[in-house]
Image: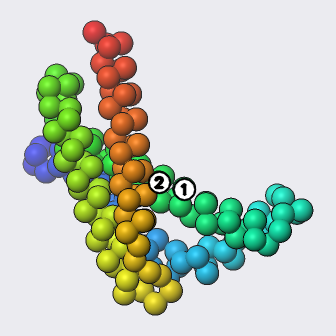
Amino acid sequence: MANTARWLKSWLPVILWMALIFTGSTDRGSAGHTSGFIEPLLHWLMPGLSHESIDSLHHLIRKCAHITEYAVLGALALRAIAPSHAGSLAEKRWKIAGLALAMAALYAASDEFHQSFVPSRGASVQDVLIDTCGACVGIGVLLLWRKRHDKRES
């Protein structure tokens, strides 16, 4: 029972986050749908911007969302893979980080494959690279935070 609880505590956030990403990869997360609330908000915040500028900002916001959602996934994956005590994390930091990054990159590729079947979406190798960079950011931030936190405790 304790092992199941420990596994759930580690992996349930990863699974739930992946489900959230999957949901965003449906038609609801398409540019056509997000433009319905992002573009009016941008027009309201910056009324003088041209339509082309609004479109560019909408595109940038969508790519930043990719980075953010995969930064969270990378951090959650690292947290799930890493052993519970800091000593092992320090010793195996790069191996654990590599596993977390590989997991996030594979999920990004599978997510793009899924999007290839959604009529309002499309698959993009560029998005897989953006997602993987986001995961790398999340993993790096969590590793730095843990390193700093471990130094404070010792």
Residue 118 lies, with reference to residue 45, above or below; the image says below
Classify residue 54 as left or right of residue 64: right
Q: Which residue is mark 2?
A: 67
131, above or below 35, in the image: above
**Element under disc 1:** helix
Q: Is residue 82 visible?
A: no
Residue depicted at 38% across the width and 28% down the height: 145
Q: CA distance from mark 2 to mark 1?
A: 5 Å
Callout 1 crowding tier (Cα within 10 Å): few <14, some 14–19, many ≥20:
some
- Residue drawn at (41%, 73%) of the image: 124
For this view, does 150 lie left or right of residue 138?
left
User: Please, what is the three-letter code of the amino acid marked with disc 2?
Assistant: Ile
Image disc number at residue 64: 1
User: Which disc number belongs to residue 47?
Assistant: none
The image quadrant where one finds the C terminus is: top left
Residue closest to the eye, 134 or 79: 134
